[in-house]
Each structure stands twice: as C-alpha cells, then as structure tokens.
Image (spheres, coloured by chain):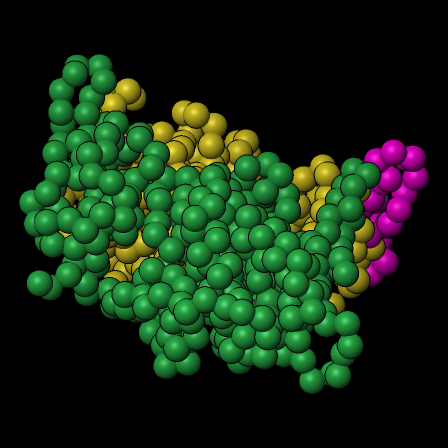
Chain colours: A yellow, B green
C-alpha cells in the first residue's frame, strides 16, 4: 500500500486541506474508487475505509494482479466533515458540481481539478455517492447515458439494480459525467444510507466492489454472486408523492414488498394530531427508495417503487 | 395589487408563498406591454430589494404616466431571504439551477415552474442579482452569447456601466434567465453591488434605466434620463485574479478604478505571523470591476476581475 497526497492546500488557521489516495499494486491505472465528496457522506467514507483495509490484506497476500493498480480515495472533503457541513465550509459550493475543475479557478474548482488530474486516467472509476434527495435506497449502480456508458460492465456488479439516468444540465459538472467524457468507465454506487452507517449494505458494497475488481481481472478474490442484477431506467420507477405537508410516519420501508392500495405512510397534522393523508401504494412492487425527513414538504417525493406484476 | 405567484403549505403551521405586486394604468385597453422585475433568487443578495422599493415608490408618485403593466417580484426565494441563505433552505441545489422547473417535481421544482409560468409573456424581464457576500461588482448585465443580438440593444438602455457577453455552458441552461429567453421572454441578468448590503447609488442608477426601458416599451410616458453608454466586452478581455495562498485579503486599490499595469491591488497577509504572503498587482491596464469584499480567502478565492483596456 502506498499512501499519496493527491491534493494539498494551506489554510491560515486550520491544518492543511489534504486529499489522500491509497494505491495498491503497480502498473496500469486499472480502477479508482472515490468515497466522500461531501461532508455528510459518512457511509461512503466508511465503505472506502473498509476497502483500504481489505485491499491491503489482499495486496499482502499477493492478490493484486501483476501490472494492475487500484487507488482508493476515502475522502475528498474532510474540511466539511470536521465542521458538520455538507458543502465547502466558506462558500457552500459542492465539489461534486465542479468537475472537471479548473487549476486557476476558485477554491473548489481547484480541488476538483487537482483530484481529477490524479484520477482521470483510470480505466474504471467507481464513486460511492449520495443523492440530493436524502433517504434510504436499495443498493444500486447508477450510470449516466452519455454514449460512453458500459451497461454490460455495470451488470457484473453484484448489486440488485443498475439504474440508467438521462443527464440533466446540472449533472454535467459531476465527477461521474466527466469521468465518462474523459473515457473512464464510470459507475456511481449507492447504498442504503449517507449520514449514518448502514452496516449491512456497507458490507454488501465492500464485497461487491472486490468481486467486481476480480471480474475485471485486477485482483484475486473469491465471491459467489447473490443477485441477478436488473436494469431499470430511473423514469421507469413509480414515484409516490405527498401533496400535503406535515409529520411523516412511514409504515413501509425500503426493500418492502407492497400490494396496490397498501398504506405506505401517514402524514399527520403537526398541531391537531389527526392523519391528513394516507399515502398508499399505486401498484404492486418493491420499495426502492423512501425519503427520511420527519417534517415533510408538500409535493415531496416520498417513495419510489419498482413495479412488479 | 399584491398577487400570489406560488403557494404551498409548509410542514408546521405556515404557508409558503411568493408574492408580486402588479401596477397597472387606471384604464386598461388589454394591449398594454408588461415589464417584470424579479430579484431574490439568491437569498443573500439584497441590492434588488432597494430597486423594487424605489421603482414602486417613483411610479406611485407619478401614476398618471403609467401606460403599461409593471410586475415586481421582490423575493423569489423568501425563505432564503429570511434565513440569510443563498439557496432554498432544505434544498441542495442552487435555485438558479432548476429552471424551468417541473409542476410534478419537488417543492422547489414546482415553485420554479410557477415562477416561469407567471413571468412568461412579459415583454421584458429584469432579473436582479447582487454578486455574493464575497465580491463587489460594478453595475453590469451578463448576456449569454447565444442571445446577444436580441439582448445587447435592450441592455444598453438600462443605464448600467458594463455589459459582459459570456460564453455558453451547459450548466447555465437551467437558470431563470436562460429558461425565459428560451421561451421567447427577453430576460436580462443584472449583477451589481455586493451580497447582504444595499448600495443606493447602484440602485438609483438602475431604477433610472428601468424607466428608460419602460418608456421604450410604451409602459411609461413621463420624463426619463439619457442612459449612459456601457462598456461592452467578451470573456477574452476579462482577467481573473485568484488568491495564490490562503490568508486575509487587505485591499489597496479601490473598486471601479481604472488601473495601470503593475498597480498594487492588495495584499494577502497572515495575521498570526505579521507577514505579507502575496502582493497582488494588476496584470494589465484596465477597469477593476470586481473586487473582493470579504477578507478571508482560501487558495483560489477570487480577489478581483479586471476588464483590460487597450490604450
Ligand atoms: Zn445571484
């Protein structure tokens, strides 16, 4: 294992800002794994820390294939993490909306450029990401349809789902999008949680990542696939929204199977205690996503359901 | 008349709403032109607050000259204004990156769709921004180069100092101005002053210009000023000055000054050691149209922008 500083920036009063990468093996830049880009991506940080631990064991046992190398970057934003902010401490910008970055630009553009310079030449790029709508998800691989996406490779990842997303204008400055533009096969990986650790899906992600690297002939690792991975377009999932605001009391959670008409959640009047709205399942299916805010805004997306017949 | 552009219940005993004030002539013919003044998308930008107030005050003082419709939207992001938040509280994305919105989307997207719906069809829309809390700007209009033919002539009437025609970027396709221009509602983006403050001179200057535009459109028939001739430039003539080190920025030159090449703009210092970490000089002869207002800088932070002038 070789720990390298990929980017460093001084501060007047804080310790220097550093982004560290852990490199395993020698030779071609085979795969790069990125963890937390935002200050609340604790689950993403944790998964990468476990990968650093496991890859070092694998490397010590001679399990990194000759001529291949893997880099893990557990955290691109410890400055925000240490002060409890999701975005950059001073100007609140999002590093993940600054790619490919600009060396002569503003602070977070420089950070993005510094990181991107070090990771853009990898053949495969994996990013443990979080969504802008917070909640619990079924584990999935997300790929953006840029014309360079590799659906077949995504399907070899032992997660239950691969989700295809059509990029929106605000996606064009994310790492995933730019990795693909620079011809890295990029996959965003989502597990159940962000701010808190969900151990079960963290272990799932760790094993699936190692198995994926083994399938790409980068490391040695024994794994028997659990899932028959299904491909879905983001828009194929059935969104369930709440037209009212109030206190959100879920009755069903992610991964639950529901029938049409089942009560998914109750929205309660915060002053008078009665149920304002019962949210029911519009179809039979499996809950892919449930939002996690207790106080619900109106029109909020509360569930996404994968329709089953 | 105060009208609601968007309404929604917040979770605990409060209604969210965006308001506008519509002024109309006493007798309506149905053929009136409409100008819309919008501001407060970024909750920490307050220069537009004064512009809205002053514009309404002057119209009401001379109501007889009003011959068209004036719609004033002082706070597109009322919760942001109230909480001193640039964005919408509880929403991750910049509100100016979600237009044209989605009537079936999240609360923020629904609100964005309501705003577009209300503004579309205006004969001119002016979206007033105030930089951010870090930088002070001279009064300027920023125009995407794809719409320069249509917008530069309109912008020249607004009595501002500078028109910056900038190159296109995919990420900017989701701004309010882009979305409105895209559906044929001419929209100008004004940037002036600094976040969290009001600079009355800029406000008055722009209000004078808005009356000129209103007169051009047939919305006002009172006396107006002769607008000043703005400087017009493209990206290539703008130099960006970014901090090479982290520290505290202390200015030497004043904002809006014509600089000579090599002139001292300011220093980045370290208050812990008493040392100057970086001296910043002008790379060219030109106008210092952007100057840092907020002293703390991280490496990369913008400290100024200069519009190069060939002498
Ligand atoms: Zn703004």
Q: Is residue A119 visible?
A: no
In the image, is residue B145 above or below residue B263? below
Horizontal and vertical percent position of residue B59: 64, 61
In the image, is residue B250 above or below residue A121? above
Horizontal and vertical percent position of residue B174: 48, 65
Q: Quadrant of residue A115?
A: top left
In the image, is residue A66 above or below residue A5? below
Task: Indicate left or right for B81 with B26 as reference.
Answer: left
What number of labels is visible?
0
- Residue at 89%, 46% (x, y): give it: A276
- Residue at 82%, 61% (x, y): give it: A260
The magenta stretch spans which residues? A255-279
Residue A272 colored in magenta in the image = yes
Residue A176 colored in magenta in the image = no
Task: Indicate left or right for A186 with B285 as reference.
Answer: right
Q: Quadrant of residue B4?
A: bottom right
Q: Quadrant of residue A207?
A: top left
Horizontal and vertical percent position of residue B162: 32, 62
Q: Is residue A89 visible?
A: yes
Quadrant including the N terminus of chain B? bottom right
- Residue at 65%, 71% (x, y): give it: B65
Q: Closer to the camera, A147 or A84?
A: A84
Q: Closer to the camera, A162 or A291?
A: A291
Q: Closer to the camera, B169 or B117?
A: B117
Horizontal and vertical percent position of residue B230: 32, 66
Quadrant including the C terminus of chain B? bottom left
């Amino acid at each position: 294992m070789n720990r390298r500083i990929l980017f460093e920036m001084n501060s007047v009063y804080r310790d220097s800002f550093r982004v560290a990468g852990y490199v395993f093996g020698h030779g071609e830049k085979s795969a790069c794994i990125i963890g937390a880009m935002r200050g609340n991506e604790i689950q993403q940080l944790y998964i990468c820390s476990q990968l650093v631990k496991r890859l070092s064991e694998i490397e010590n046992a001679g399990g990194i294939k000759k001529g291949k190398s893997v880099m893990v970057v557990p955290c691109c934003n410890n400055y925000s993490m240490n002060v409890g902010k999701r975005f950059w401490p001073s100007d609140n910008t999002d590093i993940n909306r600054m790619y490919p970055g600009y060396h002569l630009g503003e602070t977070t553009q420089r950070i993005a450029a510094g990181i991107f310079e070090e990771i853009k030449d990898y053949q495969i790029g994996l990013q443990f990401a979080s969504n802008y709508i917070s909640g619990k998800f079924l584990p999935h691989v997300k790929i953006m349809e840029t014309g360079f996406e590799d659906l077949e490779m995504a399907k070899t990842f032992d997660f239950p789902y691969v989700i295809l997303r059509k990029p929106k204008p605000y996606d064009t400055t994310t790492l995933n999008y730019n990795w693909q533009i620079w011809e890295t096969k990029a996959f965003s990986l989502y597990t159940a949680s962000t701010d808190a650790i969900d151990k079960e899906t963290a272990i799932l992600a760790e094993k699936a990542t190692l198995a994926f690297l083994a399938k790409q002939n980068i490391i040695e690792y024994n794994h028997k696939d659990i899932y028959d991975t299904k491909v879905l377009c983001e828009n194929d999932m059935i969104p369930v929204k709440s037209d009212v605001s109030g206190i959100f009391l879920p009755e069903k959670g992610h991964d639950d199977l529901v029938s049409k008409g089942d009560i998914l959640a109750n929205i309660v009047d915060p002053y008078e205690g009665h149920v304002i709205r019962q949210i029911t399942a519009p179809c039979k299916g499996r809950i892919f996503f449930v939002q996690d805010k207790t106080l619900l805004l109106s029109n909020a997306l509360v569930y996404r359901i994968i329709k089953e017949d | 008349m105060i009208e609601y552009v968007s309404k929604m219940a917040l979770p605990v005993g409060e209604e969210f709403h965006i308001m506008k004030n519509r002024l109309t002539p006493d007798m309506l013919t149905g053929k009136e032109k409409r100008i819309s003044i919008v501001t407060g998308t970024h909750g920490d930008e307050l220069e537009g607050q004064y512009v809205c107030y002053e514009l309404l005050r002057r119209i009401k003082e001379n109501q007889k000259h009003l011959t068209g419709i004036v719609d004033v939207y002082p706070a597109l992001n009322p919760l942001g204004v109230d909480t001193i938040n640039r964005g919408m509280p509880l929403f991750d994305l910049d509100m100016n990156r979600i237009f044209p919105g989605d009537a079936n989307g999240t609360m923020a997207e629904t609100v964005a769709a309501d705003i577009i719906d209300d503004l579309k069809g205006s004969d001119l829309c002016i979206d007033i921004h105030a930089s951010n809390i870090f930088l002070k700007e001279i009064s300027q209009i920023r125009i995407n180069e794809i719409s320069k033919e249509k917008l530069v002539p309109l912008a020249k009437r607004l009595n501002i100092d500078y028109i910056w025609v900038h190159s296109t970027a995919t990420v900017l396709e989701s701004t309010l101005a882009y979305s409105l221009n895209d559906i044929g509602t001419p929209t100008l983006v004004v940037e002036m002053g600094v976040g969290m403050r009001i600079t009355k001179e800029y406000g008055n200057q722009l209000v004078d210009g808005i009356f000129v535009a209103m007169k051009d459109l047939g919305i006002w028939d009172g006396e107006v000023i002769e607008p000043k001739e703005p400087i017009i430039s493209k990206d290539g003539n703008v130099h960006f000055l970014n901090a090479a080190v982290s520290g505290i920025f202390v200015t030497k030159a004043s904002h809006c000054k014509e600089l000579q090449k090599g002139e001292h703009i300011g220093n980045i210092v370290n208050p812990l050691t008493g040392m100057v970490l970086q001296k910043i000089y002008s790379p060219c002869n030109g106008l210092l149209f952007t100057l840092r207002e907020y002293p703390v800088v991280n490496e990369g932070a913008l400290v100024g922008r200069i519009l190069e002038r060939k002498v």
